[in-house]
Amino acid sequence: MNRIYIFTGKGGVGKSSVAAAHALKSAEEGKKTLLVSTDMAHNLGDIFGVKPGKEIMTVRKNLDIYEIDPTYAMKNDFSEYMDYVKKLLQMVDDSEAMGMIPGMEELFSLLKIAEIYKSEVYERMIVDCAPTGETLSLLKFPELLSWYMEKFFPIGKVGVRLLAPFSQKLFQVDMPNKEAMNEIERMFVKLIDLQEMLKDREITSVRIVTTPEKMVVEETKRNYMYMNLYNFNVDALYINRILPQDIGNDFFDQWLGLQRGYIEGLRESFSSLPVYEIPWYEEELVGEANIRRIVNDVLTDEEVFVSKVLTQRECFTATEDGYQLDIHLPGAEKAEIELFQGATDVVIKMGNFKRNIPLPNALRTYPVSGAKFEDGVLHVTFAKEETDDAEK
C-alpha cells in the first residue's frame, strides 16, 4: 500500500532536512517518491538547488518535489468549492475570500495531498510540515470542519429553502442554490474521507523532529500528546543536532552534559518509539551531498519506512453496565485533562486544545458515569440512566 509520512516539530529543528533525507533514501530504494512542503516558508528548492514552480518538479530519479501554494491549488484544482464562497462574501479575488475563512489554506493543502495520494502515482509521499502549532491546525482542520458541517446539514437545506426568498431582498446576499448545496455536501464527503486517510494507521505516519534543548523538548512532549489526542499515529522520533562527545574543548563540556540529559529524558518519554539520533554537522545541510550525510549516517535501519502502530485509535466497547471509550494520551498528566459531555459529543480539553468526539447514536442516552486515566489511556465510562417509577 502507498504511504504518507508527515514530519513535524518546532520551527528551526531541521524538519526539512530530515524529510529530504527520507525522500532521497526512498528514491534510492527504487520507490517513486514525492517530497511535499506545506510550510508557506518553503525551502525544498534551496535544499535541492532548484527553483520550483507551482507544479510538481522532478529533481532526481524517482524523486519529485512539490511546494504547495494553496491559493493556486484552490484556483486550479478546487475552484468549484470557492465560487459560491466568493459570491456569498461579495468578493472577486480568490486570495481575499480565502483570507476571510480561517483554515482554508490548510484545507486546500490537505485536499491536494489527498488527491495526489489517490492518483497512486507515488509509492511514498514525504510531507514537510510547518512548525508544530500550524501542523496541528492543519491536521485537525478536516475533523473540525466536518463536525460543524455535520451539525449544519440536518437543518441546512430546510433553512436555505425558507430563507432564500428573503435573503436577496433583505441582505443583498444569495443563499446557496441546490447545486451549491450539493457541492458543499460533496466537500463534506471529501472531508470525512480526508480525515480517515490521515488517521488510518496503514496509510499515514506522523514523525516528530526535535533537538536536545529544554524548550524544544517540552514542546515535543506536548506535540506527541496532542497528536494522540487527535488520533494520529506517531511512529518515530528524530533528535537532531547532537554534539559529538570528542570535541576536546572545555567550553562545550556543560553543553554536552545538558544534551545528554535531554536525550536520556526524550528516550525515556518516547521509549515505545524508534528514536534516531542525528549529529550536528559542521556544514549547513543544503544540497544533495550534505543531505545524503543523514541518509548514510542515520537512516541505515532497513525498517526506516516500516510504520509501527504504537497507539490504537479511540474505540467504544460494550461493558456489563454500558459502554467504555478508550483514548490514548501518552505523556499527559491527569490534572491537565478536562472532560465534558454535550448532547451529541464528548469534549476533551488539554491545554489550549479541545476535541469533540461524536457519540454513536446508541450512546446518546448514556451519560458519562466515570473517567479514569492510567498508563497513558483515558477510560471514559457510560451507563444508562435509571428511570424512576413516575417516568415508567
Image (cartoon, rainbow, N blue to C red):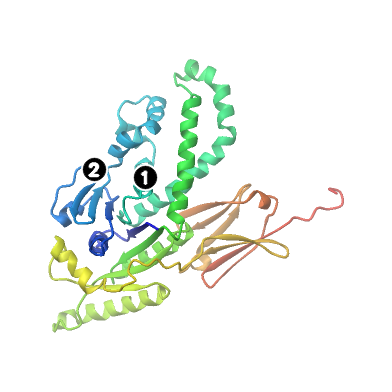
Residue 218 visible in this rendered orientation of the protein:
no
Q: How far apart are marks 1 and 2 (CA)?
A: 14 Å
Q: Mark 2 points at which residue?
A: 55
Residue at image coords 28%, 72%: 212
According to the image, label 1 marks what residue? 115
Q: Identify the secondary structure beneath mark 2.
A: loop
Which is more toward the observer, 315 or 385? 315
Q: Which of 102 and 257 is in front in this view?
A: 102
- Does 162 appear above or below 185? above
Q: Which residue is drawn at 55% across and 31% down?
A: 156
The amino acid type, in three-letter code, at marker 1 is Glu
Pinpoint residue 80: horizontal percent, then vertical percent.
Answer: 38, 31
Which label sits on residue 361? none
Decide if residue 293 is on the left or right side of residue 15: left
Tell me if residue 282 comes above or below residue 260 in the rendering: above
Q: Is mark 1 on a helix, strand or loop?
A: helix
Q: Quadrant of residue 173?
A: top left
Mark 1 or mark 2: whose residue is earlier in sequence: 2
**Quadrant of the rendering where the N terminus is positioned:** bottom left
Vertical order, 339 against 299 (above or below): above
Q: Residue at 41% across / 28% down in the picture?
A: 84
The image position of residue 224, as x and y in percent, is 41, 64
